[in-house]
Image: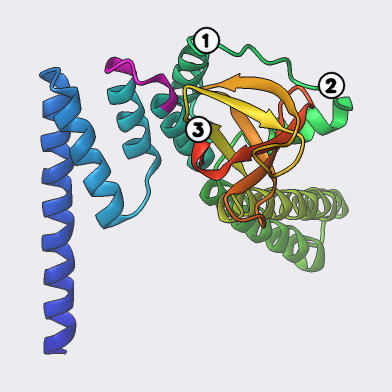
């Protein structure tokens, strides 16, 4: 019991210290000391783990410092953890508007776009909450159907249970999809000022085209030492040096 109390007290102290550290970083940002604030946010992320708010604030620092690739990178990381946040999305659009390469997203079937938008409308945690709440309501609907004598109420119970079952399935699939995006991060941001995309993972291979910092890519192959095969939003693909990009 004594150890448990000590653990609780230690956890509370850590939370208080972390909150104070973030407050200090926020204060530095307000004072326009962006380099110091960015360094502190980076330190908090390495020490205490990832958080959408920290990545968002860090992205703001880099944007103010005119380090657009790092701003895009951190906004993307924040959006990955909190896909429904409109402030993060707006700042990401603003930062990407300052990059050199203006890509055109490849067309896809409307239902794929619709599903992607639905999945990205909420975070993993939010989808889990929806799943649990829907499951509880489904059980209530089943109980109503089984024990309420009035036929009209029983119909409401059984139809409601089916609707909630549908929501349970959708929310679980969405939560799984969101978690896969976070756990298996196969996207990256180009960090080098300019990179020549190659036809194969070799310096003397054919030059395909040039891309610039801040461009988002999908990683297709990360098995070749020192090289990554990447695909761009407009559908083009090729090989780039590993150090030219940084994974989201």
Residue 116 in the image, given as x and y percentages of width and height: 73, 34
- Label 2–label 3 contact, CB within 8 A: no
Answer left or right for 162 relative to 3.
Answer: right
Near-viewer residue (58 or 245): 245
Residue positioned 16% across, 46% down in the render: 19
Residue highlighted by disc 2: 107
Q: Residues within 10 Å of mark 2 (few under 14, many from 20)?
A: few
Q: Is residue 34 magenta?
A: no
**Which quadrant: the N terminus?**
bottom left
Residue positioned 36% across, 36% down in the render: 55
Secondary structure of the residue carrying numbered label 2: loop
Instruction: Choose the circle earlier in sequence order: 3 or 1.
Output: 3
Q: Residue furthest bottom?
A: 1
Near-viewer residue (242 or 217): 242
Q: Residues within 10 Å of mark 3 (few under 14, many from 20)?
A: many
Kindly report the distance in space between the C-alpha atoms of the residues bearing marks 3 and 1: 14 Å
Residue 228 in the image, given as x and y percentages of width and height: 64, 45
Residue 40 in the image, given as x and y percentages of width and height: 18, 40
Secondary structure of the residue carrying numbered label 3: helix
Instruction: Choose the circle earlier in sequence order: 2 or 3.
Output: 3
Residue highlighted by disc 1: 97
Q: Which residues are magenta?
A: 63-69
Residue highlighted by disc 3: 76
């Amino acid at each position: 019991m004594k150890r448990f109390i000590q653990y609780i007290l230690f956890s509370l102290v850590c939370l208080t210290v972390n909150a104070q550290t973030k407050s200090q970083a926020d204060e530095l940002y307000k004072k326009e000391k962006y380099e110091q604030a960015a360094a502190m946010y980076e330190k908090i992320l390495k020490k205490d783990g990832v958080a959408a708010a920290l990545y968002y604030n860090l992205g703001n620092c880099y944007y103010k410092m005119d380090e657009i690739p790092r701003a895009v990178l951190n906004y993307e990381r924040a959006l990955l953890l909190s896909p429904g946040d409109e402030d993060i999305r707006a700042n990401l659009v603003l930062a990407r508007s300052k990059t050199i390469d203006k890509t055109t997203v490849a067309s896809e079937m409307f239902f794929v776009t619709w599903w992607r938008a639905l999945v990205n409308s909420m975070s993993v945690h939010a989808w889990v909450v929806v799943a649990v709440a829907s499951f509880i309501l489904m059980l209530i609907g089943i109980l109503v159907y089984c024990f309420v004598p009035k036929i009209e109420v029983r119909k409401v119970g059984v139809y409601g249970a089916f609707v909630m079952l549908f929501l349970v399935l959708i929310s679980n699939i969405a939560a799984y999809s969101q978690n896969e995006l976070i756990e298996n991060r196969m996207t990256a941001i180009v960090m080098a000022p300019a990179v020549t995309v190659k036809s194969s993972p070799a310096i003397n291979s054919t030059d395909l085209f040039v891309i610039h910092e801040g461009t988002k890519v999908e990683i297709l192959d990360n098995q070749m030492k020192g090289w990554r095969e990447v695909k761009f939003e407009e559908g083009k693909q090729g090989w780039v040096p590993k150090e030219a990009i940084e994974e989201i």
